[in-house]
Image (tube, rainbow, N blue to C red):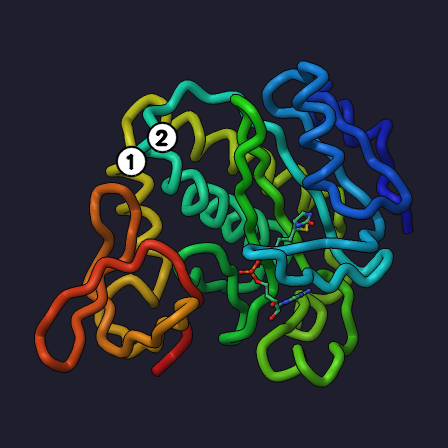
Amino acid sequence: MPLDLDSLSIRLSHRPIVWVEETDSTMHDAAHLASMGCASGTVVGANAQTAGHGRLGRKWLSVPGAGLYFSVVLRLSLPSEHLPVVTLATGLAAAEGITAASGLAVDLRWPNDVLAGGRKVCGILIEQHQSALICGIGINVDHAEFPPELEPIATSLFLAGARSVNKEDLLVAVLESLDRHIVLLAEKGPEPVLALFAQASSYVSGRSVVVDQEDAQIRGITDGLDPSGFLWVRQQDGVRKLILAGGVRPG
Ligand code: BT5
């Protein structure tokens, strides 16, 4: 069912929101609106994306009508060293919104995945466009199945046990939580956001992981976040490596 935009715009206190039936990627639409000077907080969403993407140009499966696919334009005056924390703040917001709207307990996998039952139910993508940040959020809501290559690693709120999640409630809950976490970051700096992320994520400390990087694999035990939000991993030889990017999975 399409989202009820009239009721949404009232519930979102008239925050600018654009929702289309189909687009290539809401990241592109949001970047376009940002370059036209749209207000911070503007939301662009779609019922279907033909070229939804993740990090490094990876594909984001966007089954028409089955998920929430949206991007939020943020104009923040944050020091550049705090920008990675925006990914963690957005993940916290998505996790909190999902739990509020579905009742499901979720986990966060550094840096940008929300997991339900150990599988990815939501992915976060932050891109910079001129002076704006574009926060992309994809949540699998009603998917009853996934293609074979995603089946072992992906899930939806439906498959994880939440029936009839209301997408408007979910969107409102995520956006309200995003506002709270971004205000927290802007007013108090990264520390409280990092502490909340460490509390909400089973991946931040004491977890045996493999980190897949472009040219190498790092194995070890996670050992907390550094002040910029990067992940420490202690290798078997005792050396601590700071992970700036890459896919983390159980080792
Ligand atoms: C992400 O990238 O997880 C970020 C995904 C962001 C999607 C949103 S939707 C709204 C906005 N518009 C966009 O075009 N993008 C954003 P990454 O960490 O690179 O993970 C990508 C990997 O996740 C893929 O290579 C697959 O393995 C897996 N994947 C793809 N589609 C998935 C899905 N629907 N559910 C779970 N996993 C998926």
Q: Nearer the viewer, residue 50 or 106?
A: 50
Q: Is residue 124 left or right of residue 67?
A: left
Q: Is residue 63 above or below residue 97?
A: below
Please name the residue shown 26% across and 46% down the image: 195
Q: Residue at x 60, y 64 (%)?
A: 121
| Amino acid at the residue labelled 1 | Pro
The quadrant where residue 40 appears = top right
In this view, 82 is above or below 113: above
Query: At label 2, which amino acid type do we have?
Result: Leu
Q: Could you tell me residue 213's position as x and y percent?
A: 40, 68
Residue at numbered disc 2: 185
The residues bearing labels 1 and 2 have C-alpha atoms spaced at a distance of 5 Å
Asked if the residue at tag 2 contacts the one at tag 1, i.e. Cβ–Cβ closer than 8 Å, the answer is: yes
**Viewport quadrant of the C terminus:** bottom left
- The tag earlier along the polypeptide, 1 or 2, is 2
Q: Which residue is mark 1?
A: 190
Give the side of residue 191 with respect to residue 53, left or right.
left
Mark 1: which secondary structure?
helix
Residue 4, relative to residue 144: is it above or below?
above
Disc 1 crowd rating (10 Å Cα; few below 14, some 14-19, many 20+) is many
Question: Quadrant of the rendered structure where residue 219 is?
Answer: bottom left
Disc 2 residue crowd, few under 14, some 14–19, many 20+, Cα 10 Å: many
- In the rendered structure, the answer to whether residue 241 lies left or right of residue 47 reads left
